[in-house]
Image (tube, rainbow, N blue to C red):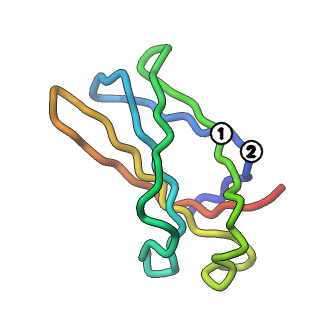
């Protein structure tokens, strides 16, 4: 699983489709991939500006300590869920990353 520092930029690149808007959800998960953070969160809405790519900053959640028991080697496990509309249909993509403080 890739490790990403909080405050680092993440780029989403649309390789084989075109869309103008993405929704990014950041969930804390346990080692089995079960969502342990609040499931009903507001997404980060991003609009592509250049070549269909977008960037966002991977932010540290204010209540991260609340999920300390689910951390692995002092790193939180994040499921970044990315939703978009492609040709009037809704699609979702996800990746797991380990969040760490610099």
Q: Report the residue at 25% width, 32% height from top.
A: 85
Name the mark on residue 57. 1
Seen as rendered, the residue at the extreme left is 88
Vertical placement of 39 versus 43: above or below?
below
Query: Along the horizontal axis of the image, is 52 left or right of 27?
Result: left
Whole-percent x, y for residue 69 in the image:
65, 85
**Count of numbered labels shown in the rendering:** 2
Q: Secondary structure at mark 1?
A: strand
Q: In the picture, residue 2 is in which quadrant?
A: bottom right
Q: Is residue 51 above or below residue 83?
A: above
Left or right placement of residue 58 versus residue 82 in this view: right
Q: Are marks 2 and 1 in contact (CB under 8 Å)?
A: yes
Residue 97 placement (x, y as % from top left): 56, 60
Question: The residue tagged with tag 2: helix, strand or loop?
Answer: loop
Residue on which disc 2 sits: 7
Q: Is residue 42 left or right of residue 74?
A: left
- Mark before the other along the chain sequence, 2 or 1: 2
Residue at image position (31%, 36%) is 84
Q: Residue at x 50, y 40 (%)?
A: 44
């Amino acid at each position: 699983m890739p490790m990403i520092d909080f405050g680092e930029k993440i780029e989403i690149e649309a390789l084989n489709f075109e869309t103008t808007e993405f929704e990014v959800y950041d969930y804390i998960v346990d080692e089995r991939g079960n969502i342990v953070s609040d499931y009903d969160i507001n997404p980060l809405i991003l609009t592509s500006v250049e070549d269909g790519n977008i960037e966002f900053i991977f932010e540290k959640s204010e209540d991260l300590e609340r999920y300390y028991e689910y951390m692995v080697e002092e790193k939180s496990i994040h499921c970044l869920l990315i939703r978009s509309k492609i040709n009037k249909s809704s699609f979702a993509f996800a990746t797991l990353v380990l969040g760490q403080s610099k």
